[in-house]
Image (spheres, helix red, strand yellow):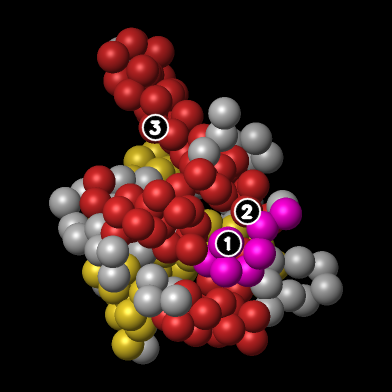
Amino acid sequence: MGHDLCRQGEPFEFIYAVRSGTFKSSLSLSNGHQQICAFPMCGDIIGMDGVASGQCASTVTALDDAQVCAIAYAPLVDLLARDPALQRRVNRQMGYELARGRRLLLLMGPFSAQERLAAFLLDLSQRFSAHGYSAREFNLRMSRIEIASFLGLSHETISRAFSALQREGLLHIDKRRVRITVLEHFARRFEALLRVD
């Protein structure tokens, strides 16, 4: 927890397959601010954004106890050239990452703070469910400040959005523990925000 897997600007050598745990990917901006750009979790691939420049594009930090499989990129490229099935699997995973990133990028558009937060929580719910965990109840490994940075909102706005969703009876919140009260209703109301037609 708190350990940097890679740092922005370091030479790019590895990609990482997340086996367990949650990370945050952040950019250090020229004005000194830190912008959260992703929360990689189990099943995600970290580091592909370093391929273009040959440098790690962001700093990736563990938010809890986590395990990754480090894969040296240069030998991987050689292996992919000889193994079409593996190449298809890697390409599919990269496509998944790009599509999910694009869906979440849409949240920076015309949506309210409450809608952005709800769609973010629904995305987490779906990701947990895909790996056999509860889709309805989970712990947030990231702070509200980190969520606010990721969604392009202020900390105060995120706190108000959590409170509004709880007042509506859509969520029950106990510190970082989130329970979606009626998952089917929550999904029907907000999953359209994550859909790209």
Which residue matches tag 1?
116
Picture coordinates of residue 90, whole percent (x, y): 38, 27
Q: Amino acid at mark 1?
A: Arg
* Residue at image coords 52%, 39%: 195
- Left or right placement of residue 2 versus residue 183 in this view: right
Q: Nearer the viewer, residue 167 or 157?
A: 167
Cα gap from disc 1 to disc 2, whole angstroms: 6 Å
Q: Residue drawn 67% across and 72% down?
A: 153
- Crowd rating for badge 2 (residues with CA inside 10 Å; few <14, some 14–19, many 20+): many
Near mark 3 (Cα within 10 A), the count class, few <14, some 14-19 or many ≥20, is some
Residue 161, position as x, y percentages in the image: 56, 77
Q: Which residue is mark 2?
A: 107
The three-letter code of the residue at mark 3 reads Gln
Q: In the figure, is residue 122 to the left or right of 57?
A: left
Marks 3 and 2 close (CB-CB < 8 Å): no
Where 146 sits versus 152, above or below? below
Identify whether 60 is placed above or below 196. Answer: below
State the residue in front, 77 or 140.
Answer: 140
- Mark 1 touches mark 2? (CB < 8 Å): yes
Looking at the rendering, the stretch of residues picked out in magenta corresponds to 110-117
Residue carrying label 3: 93
Q: Secondary structure at mark 1?
A: helix
Q: Is residue 31 visible?
A: yes
Looking at the image, which is closer to me, 89 or 161?
161
CA separation in Å, label 3 and label 2: 22 Å
Is 14 included in the stretch rendered in magenta? no
Q: Which callout, 1 or 3, points to the residue nearer the camera? A: 1
